Image (tube, coloured by chain):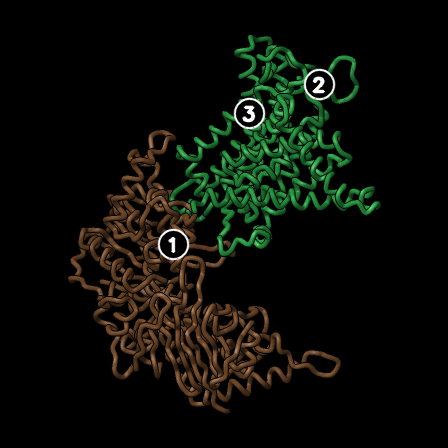
Amino acid sequence: MHEMKFELRGITKRFPGVVANDNVNLSVETGEVLALIGENGAGKSTLMNVLYGLYRADEGELLIDGQATQFSSPADAIAAGIGMVHQHFMLVPVMTVAENVVLGVEPTGRFGSLDIDEARRMVREVSDRYHLELDPDAIIEDLSVGVRQRVEIVKVLMRDAKIVVFDEPTAVLTPSEILEFFGIVRSLVEAGRGVIFITHKLKEALEIADRINVLRRGKVVGEALPKNTSEAAIAEMMVGRPVLLVVDKAPATPREAMLTLAGVSVVDPDGRTVVDGASFEVRVGEIVCVAGVQGNGQTELVEAIAGLRRVASGSISLGGKNITGDSPRERHAAGMAHIPEDRQRQGLVTELSITENLVLTRYHDAEFSQGIRMKWDAAAAKSQELVAAYDIRTTDPSQLASTLSGGNQQKVIVARELSRNIRVVVAAQPTRGIDVGSIEYVHAQIVKERDAGRAVLVVSTELDEVMSLADRVLVMYRGKIVADVDPKKVSHMDIGLYMAGSRPAAVVA
Amino acid sequence: MNETLKSLRFTLLAVVAALFVSAFIIVITDIEALGDGNLGKAFGTVGRAYWGLFKGSFGSLRAISNTITGATPLLLAGLAVSAAFKAGLFNIGATGQMLAGAVTGLFVGFAFQLPPIIHVPFALLASAAGGAAFGAIPGVLKARTGAHEVITTIMLNGIASFTVLWLLKTQLFKREGRDDAISKFVEDSAKLPKLFGFMGNRIDLLAHTGFIVGLLATFAFWWLLRKTTLGFEMQATGFNQEAARYAGMRTKSLMVTSMAIAGAFAGLAGGSEVLGLYGYASATVAGDIGFDAIAVALLGRSTPIGTLVSALLFGALQAGGRQMQVDTDVPIDLIIVLRALIVMFIAAPLLVKAMFRMRGEATSFGQTFRGWGG
């Protein structure tokens, strides 16, 4: 395979009101891994769309082996040897691996018929060469997320990509799948391909990359070599100030049980049991984290606790009172704060103002309304107060919530849910997709709530977050709580094994 | 620039674009002039047509009265569509709700003998209640079974028009000596006073105080949205039903309430036509108003003031169109084309942006088009 150098020079891409990429220079060669790291909104996606031909840059040029070139569509990028593995897979679930891989570039026999044997042979060949262990006849929907990702990789390789771009590839993987994924990346590099690895996870960038470029507010603010830098140094470059990477908290002093689940099961509309007999309690003054790979019933568990999903069997009680059949509003009134998993879909009405969102769950309180009349003046005053107290960065709370960054949107929810008389905090993925600075802030708030005598339940798929935040860790796998452990006494790897449905050797013995 | 101003400017440009395209249509259909190769004459026709349009809508007291007469039911029915849009529902059933309100208002109008000060409000209230009850049906169906309101409201329009057709032939409603579907007259005490009644009894000034009812309804709609918990709940549900449910709002009962409110507005539209304009009801009392109301709501971005302005615009086009037909050979059907073009330009924002070289301005339609999502 011949070598190739791919460069971006002075790329600037503007959108109304923002400069998404500002004079970005970047280069990658075959045989190396370049990590592109930055917070959400730093301009990573825009840059990738520019280099994959989805956007045209306003200024700057793309060079292949020093020759200026232009991509006006992904087809041009593919033809030039650039391949992209998207964060969200583009596979047809009911088709086989071989069928998916050749989709769009089908090998044909005589009379234009599909030559599926040739497709199988091609998959096997690529799979063997890179140790991907793919069965060409497996149906996609039967495969795990990690294997599906490998199918995407084969797709890219079969189109003869010399530079492979991975967009947040580890977000959906278990810890052991991440290790396997790194193995694949290394074998790609050994085979002489180049890799651009986009991530916001510091550890991974340090582990796999040959070089790291840090993007902040559309600019490349630094380049580092993993061997002479540190997580803290890169985090500082990403955020622009020193950041606390570990959660600063005192040991927990748990007291009486506040939230108790006894044999809670949830059945989804298709009749599948998605939460299977979950029993646990969350005590006052402790943070219990539910770890697990996305899609193992955590979403449904939280919705059941919040009253948004019917419980098929079992009971939930809050402070000794059975709340299993209560409405969301009754639970809210009983002192439950709920920070939902998807802030744009559930937590906020982004088309309403910041003020309106700050009273979204409380507009019916006597403080904000009388009969059917809204007291908007009182709401505006409260909003001013919360914007200041929770450091929500906005010039005007009457602006739409959609104008806020992800981190500030999350602060609106945190402010709304925590700034009242509560007894238990249920937070689902509280830091997903928000910037490092806001993560630090949200974590501090959660610890503060614990220390103020609330029971805290956090559901997170980020193992690092779980390990640093939790006083106690529950692991959820296929709807069941499979482990209840002290984070100080187990390793990342042990939890990873629980998450994958097996047991650490030490525990078995 | 402020959002409201921006969207106002955009709407104006859509109207201008529609007038421009219509002018082109007038020119190319002026066969006589084109046959002679007389383009100047064809353009002259455009000028005279649009002058007629203006004269017929605002050029005299009578023209203004005609504009108001046309705008009144469009405003009330437009509010019915807008109110549902705000709650994330697409109400295509204004026609059926108008018919329901027309019948209930009619009944109270002829079946009771009361002093006007009581009779008029009572009849109007009956119209609103009839429309609300009929409007609530698709709300209940959606809340209970998930049946999409677009389908059910269309079906209910059919049910309403045939039910009214039947009702008007029953002994209770039937007018003496008529075999067709024409109702009795309402009592004089139930009739909405003429708007320009103070100018002497000019029979050519048809505008009635149904327009005042429309203005009050517009204000009520504004008040509901801005000042009440119910309005807040409706809008939260309309924008993001998931979030509304998360926030503890009873989204299903809100669907029913919102549709009932929408139905009440449409019921008033039906009632004001019966009590203000005709004095009786026929099977065609709702006409195409329920559908034109959708265009009114779209053009007005479902806001109270927007709905008012666009109802007036559509009323003016209707009134002016007749004058245009008289003054020139341009048929009144051009008005239908013109209205269709306005809606098309509103619905295709990119087209207007391209025509006027507006760059990079986000044109958000918010919940106006949400109703399709189901």
Residue B54 as seen in the image, left or right of residue A78: right
Question: N-terminal of the two: label 3 or label 2?
Answer: 3
Q: Which residue is mark 1?
A: A343
Q: CA distance from mark 2 to mark 1?
A: 56 Å
Foreground pick, B136 / A153: A153
Chain assignment, label 2: B
Q: Which chain is brown?
A: A
Looking at the image, is A154 positioned above or below residue A320? below
| Residue drawn at the location 29% of the way across and 43% of the way down | A383
Query: Could you say where residue A435 lies in the image, as x and y percent from the top left?
Result: 32, 63
- The one of A507 and A63 positioned closer to us in this rendering: A63
The disc label shown at residue A44, or none: none
Q: How crowded is the residue under tag 1: few (<14 C-alpha within 10 Å), some, or many (20+)?
A: many
Q: Dots 3 and 1: beta carbons under 8 Å?
A: no
Q: Residue B128 has which mark?
A: 3
> What amino acid type is highlighted by mark number 3?
Ala
* Nearest the eye: A8 or B280: A8
- Tell me, yes or no, whether dots 2 and 1 are on the same chain: no
The type of residue carrying mark 2 is: Ser
Mark 3 Cα shell of 10 Å, populated few (<14), some (14-19), many (≥20): many
Q: Is residue A310 above or below residue A227?
A: above
User: Residue B149, percent across and down?
Assistant: 58, 41
Q: Residue at x 49, y 52 (%)?
A: B362
Q: Which residue is mark 2?
A: B183
Image x and y of residue B185, in percent: 68, 14
Q: Residues within 10 Å of mark 2 (few under 14, many from 20)?
A: many
Q: Distance of mark 3 from mark 1, alpha carbons?
A: 39 Å
The reply to whether the C-beta atoms of the residues labelled 2 and 1 are less than 8 Å apart is no
Report helix, strand or loop for mark 2: loop
* Residue type for callout 1: Arg
Query: Which colour represents chain B?
Result: green
